[in-house]
Amino acid sequence: MYQITTSTQAIEPCFEGEAKAVVREEGGAVYFVKQTPAAIISHACLENGSSLKGRGDAVKHLTGFIRRKPIPIDEKRRIFAFPIHSQRSPDNVWLFYFHVRSAKTEGLIEFRDHSTMPTEVSAYSIQQQLLRTSHCMSHFTDIG
């Protein structure tokens, strides 16, 4: 099972071969793994003391967010992920907040290490998810 770390930038679905997900890490590392993106996120949540559903319920309770909720994977290490589609969608991609530099260009996400990733989601939608994740972080960490 892939272990999410502070280097994890994105987890994308993969529909070719045995791999079910493509994991991008800072520095250009790319891993093809046999678990789905949802399974990787769910496992990381359990490793950090709560289920994905439990974390989603907490985010909903504290922020009022119902759809495309950001998820605090490991608040002590400040690992927060957000979906760019519905979490139930097989096309969903998970992005990790502290790695996303911008989504100013339509169809392209730029990470802090200057690598890029194509996306079909609008820059506006990515920016909104970044704002929502920042709001979520304010409830789970001491960001002051």
Image: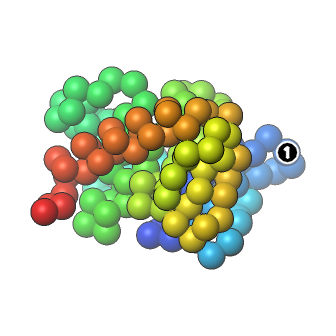
Count the marks: how many?
Answer: 1
Q: Nearer the viewer, residue 92 or 109?
A: 109
* Residue 47 horizontal side relative to residue 27, left or right: left
Question: Residue sitting at 17 percent across and 47 percent down?
Answer: 139
| Quadrant in which the N terminus appears | bottom right
* Residue 54 horizontal side relative to residue 45, left or right: left
**Residue 90 position within the rendered picture, expressed as x and y whole percent measured from the top left:** 65, 31
**Residue 43 position within the rendered picture, expressed as x and y whole percent measured from the top left:** 46, 53
Question: Residue sitting at 60 percent across and 50 percent down?
Answer: 109
* Residue 129 horizontal side relative to residue 24, left or right: left
Neighbourhood count class around disc 1 (C-alpha, 10 Å): few under 14, some 14–19, many 20 upward: few
**Residue 142 position within the rendered picture, expressed as x and y whole percent measured from the top left:** 14, 61
Q: Residue furthest front?
A: 104
**Helix or strand or loop: what does disc 1 sit on?**
loop
Q: Residue furthest top?
A: 66
Q: Nearer the viewer, residue 4 or 103?
A: 103
- Name the colouring of the figure: rainbow
Question: Residue sitting at 25 percent across and 51 percent down?
Answer: 137
Q: Is residue 142 visible?
A: yes
Q: Residue furthest bottom?
A: 27
Q: Which residue is mark 1?
A: 16
Q: Is residue 12 visible?
A: no
Kind of residue at badge 1: Glu
